[in-house]
Image (cartoon, grey):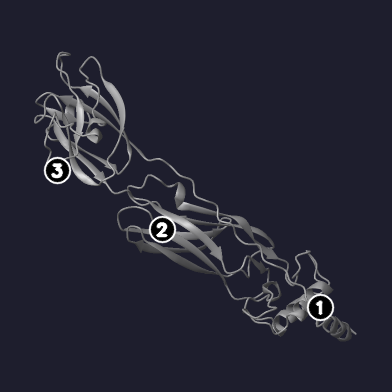
């Protein structure tokens, strides 16, 4: 009796065609973050510069920033007398020329601090050069006796810029080919970087891989995701790039898909939480259709082998009448 019932269902299925389009995973754009550097310096006539009064020397400590970075300086005088003034400035000439006290271009003038002394420290902010290089900072009053290296380096910035899947659904407890998860990783900085790229479904790791990208490079990292053991429900997919040394903009290291990955009840092709004639009709209507052919329906390809065949039909028939 059961065999005759299934046979009738199959005859009806061959006359039916139901197409269920997949829902795309929509990328969530990364947030942006403005980088900033902050230093506290003590300056002393003849002595030089230091991060503390006890570490003052000439040349002073290296100040390392990245191109275009916002730089905030808090400046104190290490001299006992308030009659000794100081003024911080960056000379972007290589070698430094100290023309007009080293501030002879608008860009250099922008780095010049207000005068400060032992009675009046100052705090001010300027923007670092957009051109990498080893430059010189100095006191405009005590030019050669108070110098240091102002290093403008290329930024370190890795990012995840894309996340896609070969399909956005699976069936629980159905043996199937893995779903391919593709993560696009980019090196937006100015130096070659080695870092890890990973993908997760909710909190469960899908895959993790180390990659090396040259400055400006982009690559696709693919993971094969076995979905057999997943329980029914919706999963949020995320991708992550680990922070590299010197990186300040980490907001774009993560990528979140705003669409979910749906794990459906086994055999429930239509997604209505029950396995019935609609599901049998869908599989029967696309029977023999392969990926790329007109009429192929991914939802009817339950085991993800790029063709709808007897294997898919057996899954639906074997779960007929069951539901969530």
Is 180 on the left or on the right of 317, as rendered? left
Q: Residues within 10 Å of mark 1 (few under 14, many from 20)?
A: some
Is 4 drawn above or below residue 271 in the view shown? below
Q: Which mark is residue 271?
A: none
1 or 2: tag closer to the N-terminus:
1
Q: Residue at x 40, y 45 (%)?
A: 249
Relative to 159, 93 lies left or right: left
Q: Position of residue 100 (x, y in %)?
A: 13, 29
Most distant residue in the front direction: 105
Q: Which residue is mark 1?
A: 16
Q: Earlier in the sequence, mark 1 or mark 3?
A: 1
The residue beneath circle 2 is 186
Marks 1/3: CA–CA distance? 78 Å
In what element is the residue under mark 2?
Answer: strand
Q: Out of 132 and 6, give the one closest to the viewer.
A: 132
Element class at badge 1: loop
Name the residue: 37% across, 51% down: 157
234 vs 33, nearest the viewer = 33
Distance, label 1 to label 2, CA atoms, is 46 Å
> What residue lies at 71% left-to-right and 79% top-to-bottom?
312
Callout 2 environment at 10 Å: few (<14), some (14 to 19), or many (20+)?
A: many
Question: Which percent across, then down, holds residue 25?
Answer: 60, 60
In the displayed structure image, the side of residue 225 where residue 47 appears, left or right: left
Residue 33 locus on image (x, y percent): 43, 42
Quadrant holding the N terminus: bottom right
Observer-nearest residue: 57 or 122?
122
Where disc 3 sits, the SS reads loop
Regarding residue 319, the answer to whether it shows in the image is: no
Identify the disc placed on residue 94: 3
């Amino acid at each position: 009796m059961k065999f005759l019932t299934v046979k009738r269902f199959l005859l009806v299925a061959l006359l039916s065609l139901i197409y269920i389009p997949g829902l795309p995973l929509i990328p969530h754009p990364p947030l942006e973050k403005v980088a900033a550097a902050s230093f506290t310096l003590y300056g002393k006539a003849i002595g030089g510069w230091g991060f503390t009064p006890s570490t003052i020397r000439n040349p002073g400590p290296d100040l390392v920033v990245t191109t275009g970075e916002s730089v905030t300086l808090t400046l104190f005088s290490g001299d006992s007398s308030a009659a000794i003034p100081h003024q911080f400035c960056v000379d972007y000439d290589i070698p430094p020329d100290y023309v007009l006290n080293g501030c002879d271009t608008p860009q250099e003038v922008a780095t010049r601090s207000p005068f400060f002394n032992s009675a009046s420290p100052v705090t001010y902010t300027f923007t670092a050069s957009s051109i990498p290089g080893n430059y010189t900072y100095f006191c405009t009053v005590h030019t050669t006796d108070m110098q240091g290296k102002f290093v403008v380096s290329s930024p370190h910035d890795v990012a995840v810029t894309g996340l896609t899947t070969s399909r956005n659904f699976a069936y629980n407890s159905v043996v199937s080919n893995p779903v391919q998860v593709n993560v696009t990783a980019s090196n937006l900085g100015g130096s070659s970087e080695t870092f890890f790229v990973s993908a997760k479904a909710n909190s469960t790791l899908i895959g993790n891989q180390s990659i090396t990208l040259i400055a400006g490079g982009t690559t696709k990292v693919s993971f094969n995701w076995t979905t057999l053991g997943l329980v029914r429900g919706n999963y949020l997919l995320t991708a992550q790039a680990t922070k590299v040394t010197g990186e300040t903009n980490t907001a774009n290291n993560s990528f979140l898909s705003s669409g979910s990955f749906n794990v459906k009840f086994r055999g429930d092709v239509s997604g209505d939480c029950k396995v019935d004639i609609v599901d049998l009709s869908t599989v029967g209507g696309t029977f023999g259709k392969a990926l790329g052919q007109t009429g192929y329906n991914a939802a009817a390809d339950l085991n993800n082998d790029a063709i709808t065949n007897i294997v898919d039909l057996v899954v639906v028939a074997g779960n007929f009448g069951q539901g969530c």
